[in-house]
Amino acid sequence: MRHGTRVAGKWFLVFILPLVLAGTACLSPVTTPAPTATVVVADTPAADDLSTKEVVETEPIIISSFSPDEASLVSLYHKVNPSVVHIKIYGDGGLPLGSGSGFVADEDGRVVTNAHVVRDAVHIEIVYYNSARRFASVIGLDADADLAVLEVDEPPLDAPALTLGNSDQVQVGQNVIAIGNPFGYQGSMTVGIISGLGRRLDSQRDLQTLNQGKFSNPGIIQTDAAINPGNSGGPLLDSEGKVIGINTAISSLSGSSSGVGFASPIDTLKKLLPHLIAEGSYDYPWLGVSSLPELDLFTMQELGITESRGVLITNVNIGGPAYAAGIRAGDFIVEIDGRQLNDFGDLIGYLVAETEPGTDVEFHVLRDGEVELITVTLGKRP
Amino acid sequence: MQRITTRHLITASLTLLLLLAFTSIACNTVESLPNTPGATSTPIVLVATPTEISSEDAAPLDYTEERIVNVYDRVKPSVVHITNRSEVIDFWRGIVPREGSGSGFVIDSEGNILTNYHVIQDAQEIEVLLPGGAVYPADLVGADPYNDLAVVQISAPSSILVPIEMGPSKNLRVGQRVIAIGNPFGLDWTLTTGVVSALGRTIETEGGQALGEVIQTDAAINPGNSGGPLLDTLGRVIGVNTAIQSPSGGSVGVGFAIPTETILRVVPQLLSHGYYPHPWLGITTYELTYELRPPQEGPEHGLLVAAIDENGPADIAGIQPAQATRQGRSILFEGGDIIIAVDRIPIERRDDLTIYLEHNFRVGETVELTMIRDSEEISLDIDLQEQPHR
């Protein structure tokens, strides 16, 4: 590594589907369980306070002993859980392949989940909170944003669509709630806060044809709510029960929650959903450039760049829209349509959120110490 | 009560939370430092009394913080650190001292302390450390391995024993805040918080038994937390922290606690009899579809009675077992009652029946089983006996 000053952090980004249902039931007869240990019997009087058993019949009411924030979490679960589903995927001949989470996202009972949850599925079964089960099929899929939309056969009426919030208005520090099926435990609620914003995840798509790495999924929400294998595709909610993200990945050494989970922003889903339903896929705008994950001072020194806020273009796809407009490797983009860019994530985030193929975007490009204005007509992502 | 079981055989293991340490290398330090958690290698300074902070220096607490701080102050005196000492024979080193530690809590002024069975399992010596730093040897009062509960007793003066308050576990709600106090990694009286993630879980313990009606929480529960209380925000016990789901062995936000309901049912029996008398049917069954190919004409799911214990409850009630004949490498069952419901509630899995009986019936009570016999549906009342000790 350059200058040998950075310590390479060893961590893994784990996509959180792989919950493999393995094994067959054992064939030995089992009787009702017998206590096996010999027990020492002591002559002790029974405690009165333990024998007075308080029997209270369960009623779906909020108990007054809850603090206001507890009461709101309890009622949120009550309201949202019926719309969160367990997604089980099967291969040929009903072979179980794994499971993940999802949620009802529109009035027609369509279910949204991660693309990586259903990617290998031949058959998809949706299990609702009340054990209702339906078959479903993929009607739209986007590997770059890791999203899939499922059409459900006769969706149950008591699973209404969740309200989709706005992920561009969320703040680091606000409370968030995840509901899903960690390790197959259906309907598990975990809580935490938003730990970070604007993270990026690599696309689930391998691009053999372009030697430029992977597309990025921008605007990712980082949370410390426990996210585990099986939570994939489930909703990340704000305190009002609105969906602000879709739990997608974790950063972990053990393969399970370490307090660093990632959710795809709901704004991306809102943009893609109509296209995924109508056309089965979404055409992203395409610029045809690559950059570095980050621009450090050493690289800036080597390249003689004085400004750290911006996007250094390291590669331009020949024949792509940026190339056609005259952008070249080594150019330093500081503004897009009048907005300051801090890093590559800002650029991708702007393109995904604000533009579509055919849109003209205007760049302020720093080249040889001069600022140039370059207009690019965006293409369609290959 | 319709049971929805979501059990899976998964690659990750369900871990019981006894913190175990083979202390052959450090056995001398364990001897000389009884107050230091022997299971951790990190030196830990135990401060016996918290430093007073003047009210001007203290940061203002919000409502939730206030409640949690209050619960810790009130409940900490009831929580204890339990050390389990035994000697095991090692092939190379001969007799090696083995030490494990867990948590527990004081349930009455007689010095009775509730913990998990697996915390004190196989102990030759049980030691209880109270928050003030006092250490007492403890005697086993009673244990229920099936529910993973045990009561030990210390002869401490009642002036230093602070019994914990038991809460109701019937009206818990997913989303309500919970507080765990225990000794994760030997770090005494550690407080962690979270919410109830789910209720009514069935978990499979390391012994392969299914434990029902378990509380799931995302509060950090780690090795050493076993036997410690899970509390509501009023400081009342809602469960005993018992197991975690974890590929790593540490908390991943999926912890399990045995509910107060089970505690209130089992503990009085442990105190008076030393064991819990489990209701017993006296049958051996196979699960149709899951373990046996179902008959061509007959139910797809149910429990085929393969054997009955002579003079057991099922025998007395007239339940008929199947005749088994060996055919090459497989066994053919002919006839036999197929249990399809208990108290009119349909069942498919043996665990469903076991858990339903365990949670709803006492020895001597009568349960109604619905069965298929010769393609006819019949119902029999069965007087439950006490599970024999084996």
Image: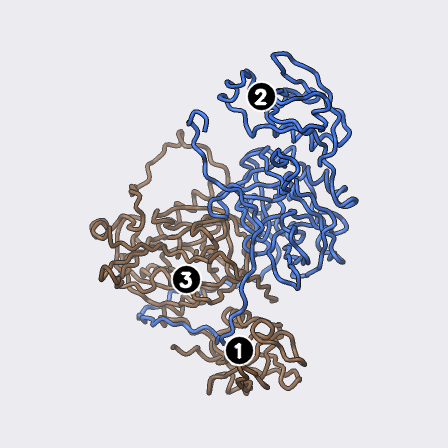
Chain colours: A blue, B brown
Q: Are marks 1 and 3 in contact (CB under 8 Å)?
A: no
Is the residue marked by circle 3 packed among few (<14), some (14-19), or many (20+) residues within 10 Å?
some
Residue A49's disc number: 3
Q: CA distance from mark 1 to mark 3?
A: 39 Å
Residue B285's disc number: 1
Q: Position of residue A11 (x, y in %)?
A: 48, 40
Q: Is residue A272 above or below residue A231?
A: above
Q: Position of residue A46 (x, y in %)?
A: 37, 67
Q: Are marks 2 and 3 on the same chain?
A: yes
Q: Residue most toward the top?
A: A370
Q: Position of residue A235 (x, y in %)?
A: 63, 46
Q: Which residue is mark 2?
A: A309
- Say whether disc 2 or disc 3 marks the residue closer to the N-terminus: 3
Q: Are marks 1 and 2 on the same chain?
A: no
- Residue at left 26%, top 56%? B136
The residue type indicated by label 2 comes to Arg
Is the residue marked by circle 2 packed among few (<14), some (14-19), or many (20+) residues within 10 Å?
some
Q: CA distance from mark 1 to mark 2?
A: 70 Å
- Secondary element at tag 3: helix
Residue B91's disc number: none
- Residue at left 44%, top 29%? A6
Image mark 3: chain: A
Image mark 1: chain: B
Q: Is residue B7 above or below residue A193?
A: below
Q: CA distance from mark 2 to mark 3?
A: 66 Å
Q: Is residue A99 left or right of residue A30?
A: right
Q: Position of residue B346 (x, y in %)?
A: 62, 72
Q: Are marks 1 and 3 on the same chain?
A: no
Q: Are marks 1 and 2 in contact (CB under 8 Å)?
A: no
Image mark 2: chain: A
- Secondary element at tag 1: strand
- Secondary element at tag 2: loop
